[in-house]
Image (cartoon, grey):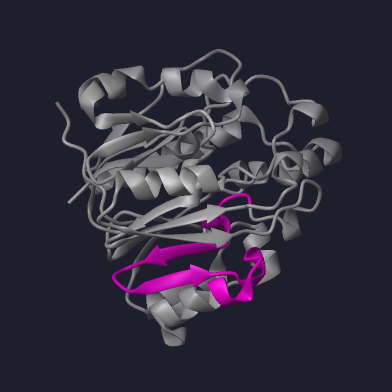
């Protein structure tokens, strides 16, 4: 049996589920798209090709192999998008929590059954139906659990609002020894530059004590300020609106020293190297067209 262990975002990775881009199916219709960025590319005729996305994901698998990480992949469902494994579940401490996601996507969770069998039922938690949550909004950070949410009365109007306050409360009850800190995110169904789909679209802790941050992703300035004070201004890389649109905060840490990042994130990658990180660069710009990047397509199971 596998012993799950996730205390934070950056301890040395041992096992992970990496999504899969095979048999992704035809380009979705605009009505079937889940986010404004996909809609943009569908309209422009620039929606990513399966072969390009498979190639991008294999490059990430190769980096994991280099660092001796055990990689699980979902079973392929024909004509179905299974790239973003972070959406379907997440691990905190030794528990895997099934995400209550958009109903159309439940089959994605079934496709990791072979991994769930290794974890064992007693370590899998299914939240009550009223709790909406996706892994992109949930970040364990040692004594804290950071959660992106949206509590506006118009929550149900936003297909981009994925995590609600019911889920925040449920997670606090499951982990009473942690401090759960919720952040209200800016949502837009139509403008990808004004939409923080998940918390990891505008924030991610890196290393031991640093973070990538985008101010406009947060609805409430004092919540953004709390993070600035928590990490310290000199340890934060603030990304621009354009960089947020290209998902610069959605990189992935293999350890406190090693980060997988997109090749085109030149300003960020330069800063990371100046701060002493090893940056493993990959091409991921086709996958990014679906408003998800490296953190979205990985589901860490075990860190040291």
Relative image position of residue 9 (x, y in whole percent): 34, 56
Residue at the (55%, 31%) spot, across then down: 101
Residue at the (64%, 57%) spot, across then down: 246
Residue at the (75%, 27%) spot, across then down: 32
Relative image position of residue 302 (x, y in whole percent): 23, 43
Residue at the (29%, 24%) spot, across then down: 115
Q: Is residue 39 magenta?
A: no
Foreground: 21 or 33? 33
Q: Which residues are magenta?
A: 197-223
Foreground: 25 or 62? 25
> In the image, is residue 177 above or below residue 87?
below
Image quadrant in which the N terminus is located: top left
Residue 9 visible in the current orientation? yes
Residue 295 visible in the current orientation? no
**Marker count (numbered):** 0
Q: Is residue 212 magenta?
A: yes
- 276 on left or right of 270: left
> In the image, is residue 215 above or below residue 105?
below
Relative image position of residue 11 (x, y in whole percent): 24, 57
In the current view of this chain or complex, which residue is farthest to the bottom? Answer: 234
């Amino acid at each position: 049996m596998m012993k799950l262990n996730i205390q934070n975002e950056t301890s040395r990775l041992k096992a992970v589920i990496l999504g899969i881009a095979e048999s992704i199916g035809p380009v979705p219709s605009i009505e079937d798209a889940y986010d404004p960025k996909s809609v943009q590319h569908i309209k422009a005729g620039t929606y990513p090709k399966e072969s390009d996305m498979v190639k991008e994901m294999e490059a990430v698998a190769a980096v994991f192999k280099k660092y001796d990480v055990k990689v699980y992949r979902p079973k392929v469902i024909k004509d179905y998008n299974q790239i973003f494994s972070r959406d379907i579940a997440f691990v905190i401490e030794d528990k895997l929590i099934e995400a209550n996601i958009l109903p159309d996507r439940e089959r994605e969770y079934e496709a990791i059954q072979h991994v769930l069998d290794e974890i064992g039922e007693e370590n899998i938690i299914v939240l009550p139906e009223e709790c909406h949550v996706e892994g992109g909004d949930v970040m364990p950070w040692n004594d804290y659990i950071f959660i992106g949410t949206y509590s506006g009365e118009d929550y149900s109007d936003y297909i981009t609002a994925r995590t609600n306050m019911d889920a925040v409360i449920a997670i606090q009850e499951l982990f009473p020894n942690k401090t759960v800190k919720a952040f209200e995110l800016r949502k837009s169904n139509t403008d990808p530059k004004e939409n923080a789909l998940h918390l990891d679209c505008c924030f991610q802790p890196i290393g031991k004590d640093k973070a990538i941050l985008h101010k406009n992703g947060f609805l409430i300035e004092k919540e953004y300020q709390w993070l600035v004070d928590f990490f310290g201004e000199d340890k934060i890389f603030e990304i621009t609106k354009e960089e947020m649109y290209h998902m610069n905060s959605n990189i992935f840490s293999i350890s406190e020293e090693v980060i997988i990042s997109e090749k085109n994130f030149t300003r960020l990658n330069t800063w990371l190297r100046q701060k002493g990180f090893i940056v493993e660069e990959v091409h991921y710009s086709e996958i990014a067209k679906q408003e998800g990047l490296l953190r979205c397509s990985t589901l860490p199971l075990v860190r040291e």
